[in-house]
Image (cartoon, grey):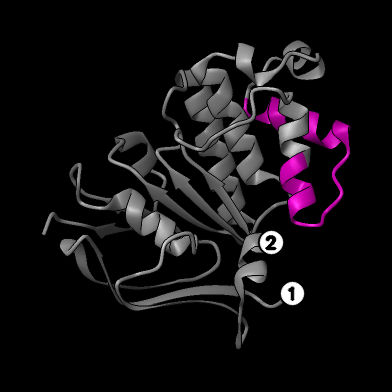
Amino acid sequence: MEPLTIIADGIEKRFSQRPVFKRVSFEARPSEIIAIIGPNGAGKSTLLKIIANVLSPTKGTQVWQSGSTKLDNDGIRVRMGFAAPYLELYDELTAVEHVEFVAAMKGIPLGAGTALELLEEFGLDPKIAKSDRRLRAYSSGMKQRVRCAMAFACSPAALLLDEPTSNLDEVGTAMMLKQATQAAERGAIVFIATNDERERAITHREIRLEPV
């Protein structure tokens, strides 16, 4: 598979005629960890959603390219992992079922054993992960570990992480940052929307947003 590049040119976003940010341009290449920083309300999560192709920019362009080929929505979905504390989970599913569901959506079979290993890499108690406990019984920190495992399932070429260590303790934070660093070392593009100094410390460069 050709290397991935994500290119943004003059991205702007408005909501009901209210500008959120203006003229954001970048070119992200494999093995880069890029922080999206700025005060509350500057549009960090909004920009991350635009990069994820969930939102459309009001102005400007964004392209995901594999080599010289522009990727469509399906191509982006298969290559992307996304994690955020506001990402909805299914209360009636187990942690393993969540990870398997993400893999299935990408058309990549993932056995329960592999899903368990991934959940353990993010610090979820193996006894809990192996049980039939549904997500409704999980704490906020446990749910965030599941979200992180879901994002990293199938070794995506691009990871889009919105405050990924939110609700995690020190051990969970260290595990998350280690996994993000290792993903970049394997060639992934990693975006982190954050104001957390621990998350910023692993990044290579920053995109700073200011309120308009």
Residue neighbourhood size for the residue with mark 2, other residues' Cα within 10 Å, grouped as few (<14), some (14–19), many (≥20)? some
Q: Which mark is residue 1?
A: 1
Asked whether, in this view, residue 122 is left or right of residue 9, the answer is right
Q: Quadrant of the C terminus?
A: bottom left
Q: In the image, which residues are magenta? A: 101-122
Above or below — where is 160 with respect to 83? below
Q: Which residue is mark 2?
A: 78
Tell me which corner region of the image, top left, top right, bottom left or bottom right, holds residue 24: bottom left
Residue at image x 64%, y 29%?
90
Q: How would you rate the neighbour count of disc 1 (Cα within 10 Å): few for under 14, some for 14-19, many for 20 or more?
A: few
| Residue 120 vs residue 210, the one in the foreground | 210
Residue 74 seen in the figure: yes
Q: Position of residue 187 (x, y in %)?
A: 61, 62
Q: Residue at x 61, y 44 (%)?
A: 151
Number of callouts? 2
Q: What's the residue at 76%, 16% (across, down)?
A: 126
Q: Amino acid at mark 1?
A: Met
Q: Residue at point 77% right, 11% down?
A: 127
